[in-house]
Image: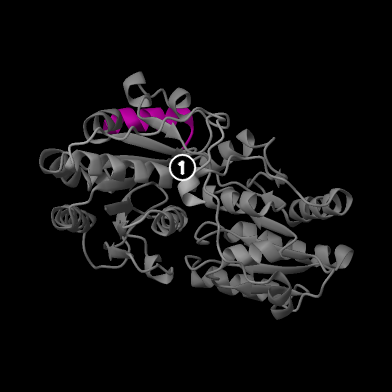
Amino acid sequence: MRLMVYSHDTFGLGNIRRMLAICHHLHATVENLSILIVSGSPMLQSFRVAAGIDYIKLPCLKRSDTGELGVKFLPMEADEVIRLRRELLLSTVLSFRPDVILVDKKPDGLAGELEPALRHVRCALPDTHVSLVLRDILDAPAKTTEEWTKRGYNNVLHWYYDSILVLGSQGVFDVCAEYRIPPAICRKVMYCGYVARHEALEDSAKLRAELGVSSGTALVLATAGGGEDGFALMLQSIEAARRLHTERGAHMVVVAGPELPSAQRKRLSTAAANAPYTRVLEFVPDMMSYMHAADVVISMGGYNTVCELATLNKRAVMVPRTAPVMEQLIRMERMADYGPYVALSPHGLRADAVADAVLTQLSDAQRHGRSEWRLDMGALPRIAHFIRQIGGRRSAQAMHMPQARLPEWEVGEPFVDAAAS
């Protein structure tokens, strides 16, 4: 069976990291599955992919502070690059002839670039199953509803899509109700739970030793994903490191991110040179191992970060981004009862507030021990089960047998995927 995955990133690394996690799990648990990823993420080539997974790299686009699209690298106009990407996507569908297509977040793709490919699928590949993959929260309800109406997304979902896989829980955020999705479209929605990150972790004691952190010494990790919009958070974290070391003897590691401008990275390195036991790293390919080794993680409130923290049951201090979308702030508000984190406002963020929050988390860890997140982390086995069901249905069609019935899940229903165990 052939699976095509479309994912775009004009800002940060979140989308491609999330879709890669899904692809790796599907490849490991679904037999005879070939996966082709099509993405414009500038960091796609930096991630390891397994045999049986390959990718087509689209020319990169970027988004300005005002939301306008521009070209990241090529000396071309945005319209030219969008046209090129659109043609590459259509050509990929024509040649690869996928059995299943997973589309990340935008129903018709970035700037509508996926629409010709979707139209071809519906006209020439009617048996191809097309699914939209949504993270739990997109943006504020009013803004999201307005955008979906303006762009005609409900019509796109009606004509081109067979299902919508929500990577979240209805109890945390009810996508259909919050975004006023029509009932006919809601019948295509399945809440899959959150994406657990089952990655091989480096031994924490070994990693801490490499970082010069002895047993019993508190280690604080500060990270802001790609880093493009995390400078203020990381700078205040470094300033907080002085007090954290004075009061608790803590060490700090700051992962700046590959998208942080070089001038800002230099400022962080200069600040760290004046902070005891603080070091700045540009990028680590194994962020989960660093999180696992840390006692407290300082981060933003992105979907991937929350899933990683929940997988590791890690205490956190989270400073959600509020622009260009409100997604992270809403997530922090809705998850207040689901995880052991302290949320801080990004507006007027100060080092003392960061230090206070970290010290609170370290004290709670001493008093109460292991932290616990209470999220449904079953997205990966559910999606794998879903893909296998589609494969079974296609096989039945080819042999003129009764079709396999696609799964229906109720919120909160325990899911046991025997085939993946």
Image color mode: one colour
Question: Is residue 324 at all visible to an observer of this figure?
Answer: no
Question: Is residue 395 at all visible to an observer of this figure?
Answer: yes
Residue 171 in the magenta stretch? The answer is no
Q: Is residue 290 above or below residue 88?
A: below
In the rendered structure, the answer to whether residue 410 lies left or right of residue 350 reads: left
280, 38: nearer the viewer = 38
Type of amino acid under label 1: Arg
Residue most toward the top? 183
Tell me the quarter of the picture where residue 385 sits.
Answer: top left
**Which span is picked out in magenta?**
139-152
As helix, strand or loop, the secondary structure at mark 1 comes to helix
- Residue at the image position 80 percent from the left and 67 percent from the top: 242
In the rendered structure, the answer to whether residue 343 lies left or right of residue 247 reads: left
Residue 305 locus on image (x, y percent): 57, 53
Q: Is residue 285 above or below residue 80?
A: below
- Residue at the image position 47 percent from the left and 54 percent from the top: 14
**10 Å crowding of disc 1: few (<14), some (14-19), many (20+):** many
Residue 187 locus on image (x, y percent): 36, 24
Residue 276 locus on image (x, y percent): 78, 74
In the rendered structure, the answer to whether residue 321 lies left or right of residue 222 reads: left
Residue 111 locus on image (x, y percent): 26, 46
Q: Is residue 85 above or below residue 218?
A: above
374, 274: nearer the viewer = 374
How many marks can you see? 1
Magenta: main secondary structure equals helix
Q: Which residue is mark 1?
A: 382
